[in-house]
Image (cartoon, rainbow, N blue to C red):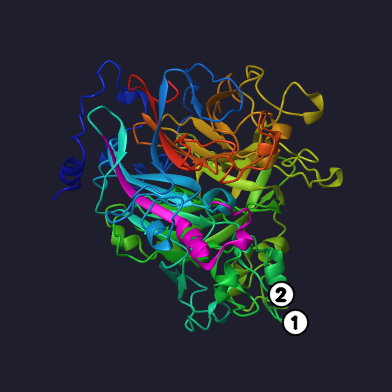
Amino acid sequence: MTQRKSFETEIEAVDDTAVPRDMAPSLGDLWSRRTILKGLGAAGLFATTSTSLVALGACDKPAARGFNFKELARGVDQTHHVAEGYDADILIRWGDAVLVDAPAFDPQNQTADGQRRQFGYNNDYVGFVPLPYGSGASDHGLLCVNHEYTNADLMFPDLTDAMAASAEQVDVLMAAHGGTIVEIGRDAGGKWRPVPGGAYNRRITALDTEIEIAGPAAGHDRLRTAADPKGKRVIGTVNNCAGGVTPWGTYLMAEENVNIYFAGTLPDGHPEEANYKRMGIPGDKMGWARFHDRFDIGKEPNEANRFGWVVEVDPLDPAAAPRKHTALGRFKHEGCENAATKDGRLAIYMGDDQQFEYLYKFVSAAKFDTKDRAANRGLLDEGTLYVARFEQDGTGIWRPLVHGQNGLDASHGFASQADVLIEARRAADILGATPLDRPEDVQPDPLTQRIYVALTNNAKRTADKVDSVNSRAKNLWGQIVEIAPEDGDHGSERFSWTLLVACGDPAKPDVKAQWNEATTGDGWFACPDNLAVDGKGRLWVATDQGEKWSETSGAADGIFALQTDGNGRGTARRFFRVPVGAEMCGPCFTPDSTTLFVAVQHPAADGTEDFEGFRRASTFNDPATRWPDFAADMPPRPSVLAIREKKGGLIGG
């Protein structure tokens, strides 16, 4: 039974002619994945299933790629808003059924068993894998969603602190972490719907999902525990922030702030003491160690070394165990978007999301094969991890984290490549990497091969630590860096770089913002976080101001279109904004760029004390908004939305 037929048995058949021909985007307007697949070759292009298409070779610079939509006004209130002429429909919410036997969502009577079958909390990264695999379809596919963390005070009645959660509540919280794979499709009216009981539907949780450990650190003594004496299996994944989708259709989950799950104290003089301090461990904010000993480093000293990795999941094989790839290094991974090198290997770009941390890339040793998915199973287990050094003259170099080279040896406490990867941050220190202003998402441009890096902010940077890539002290607003690999090759160890924009209010000279003068008072933004590139190679930015939104911009987070070339380079436009207290996440396009999926995380959580008319802490019993249901018996619910132009045209025009 084909996936198309399976989909049609669950929902009304997709009407391929629903978009009038004169409204549909022409093939000349965007890169067609089906066309690209026909021309696949050593020097050609390949079709990925992530948010962008990435070329194997350098491309001629395209014509200026602007946007054509009426800009959304800045503001903040209890609901979401999208630019005129677009619909933004709720696709799936926390607690909605994922597995066929999931119970109806009842926020007053939650159970771990129910939550492991329902959509998790705090949806962050969103990826899309077309169905059938390799088809490039834009009306049917698998949505892959990360569930980064939980806000216990907004999830349970009468609970104001996660540290006071009961054992059963902690298990619910653990089950709400991880990821979701859910089949979705467009109905006859063009609206996206989840497919009930989809054959690929799956939940991955921190509570009970068994995950393989692969790569150079697998089986190392520092990853062995009482429950796993071989050091090759771990239960669960946590704090999955951004991610990526590989050219062979697997889903990458990036473990970020893993320190907040660990409590306890190491014995005096324990060999992991410096390693854990560098990662902020313990930094307990979840209280799990009260009921799960493995999160107490005093009781299980090595467990924390088993978190902070990139996890690969095969969404097309629900029975396959996810894999933590140690070759990609251990740090606070924001994302793992990818691009092909000129010779057909895979480069994965990763930010370490903390003030004064680094930008990394991994380049596989072998070439990938989109026609033989099984051949890529071990591709991410062998390769070279690099860290970026930005020079003041606008050049840069990727320095390899390889045992035995450049001081990464026994003289600095590295006995093997496993040690280098487990302590990637310390290894990068020794290599002289450039400390950045919270490097978060990294997105390659498919047409120019340039790479865009979101540096979110750094209030701790002082005037004596300012440099050309981190050009402002007490940087509350962030910046976006543009990198050009040497010869347009993602395998190169050299690059040039420039600032695309320095964020913040251009009307305030002391902010030292840098925008194109065409950017309006509604268009500028602060704290860039997630990035996406659409089918025309245009950059879209999601922001995360956190609790300081009233100080950094005075408006809600959102999605912004940002021009990267032509006379409009550096011009931003506001396209979407979230409800009060929420963070904007997960921008992801379908291959034809007629749908933009976005994730609204933790509505009613951040900075509600500064929200006019509320001005107090927000809780389950008294939330700043009840978005998206606005029902008295429902708390605010993190949700994924599908945005479409009302006439079926390209997002952004």
Q: Give 318 or 154, whichever is nearer the viewer.
A: 154
Q: Nearer the viewer, residue 649 or 102?
A: 102
Choose between 12 and 152: the one closer to the eye: 152
Q: Position of residue 387 (x, y in %)?
A: 62, 56
Report the amino acid beneath label 1: Gly
Which residue bears the numbered disc 2?
Answer: 273
* Left or right of 506 on screen, residue 337: left
> Cβ–Cβ below 8 Å for labels 2 and 1?
yes
- The amino acid pointed to by label 2 is Glu
* Residue pictured at 73% horizontal, 44% vertical: 458
Residue 149 higher or lower than 214, as above or below = above
**x and y percent of residue 423 in the render?**
64, 68
Residue plotted at (21% across, 29% down): 16
User: Which contiguous range is marked in magenta?
Assistant: 157-186
Mark 1, Cα crowd under 10 Å, few <14 / some 14-19 / many 20+, is few
Residue 269 badge: 1
Report how far apart the C-alphas of labels 2 and 1 lie in the structure: 7 Å
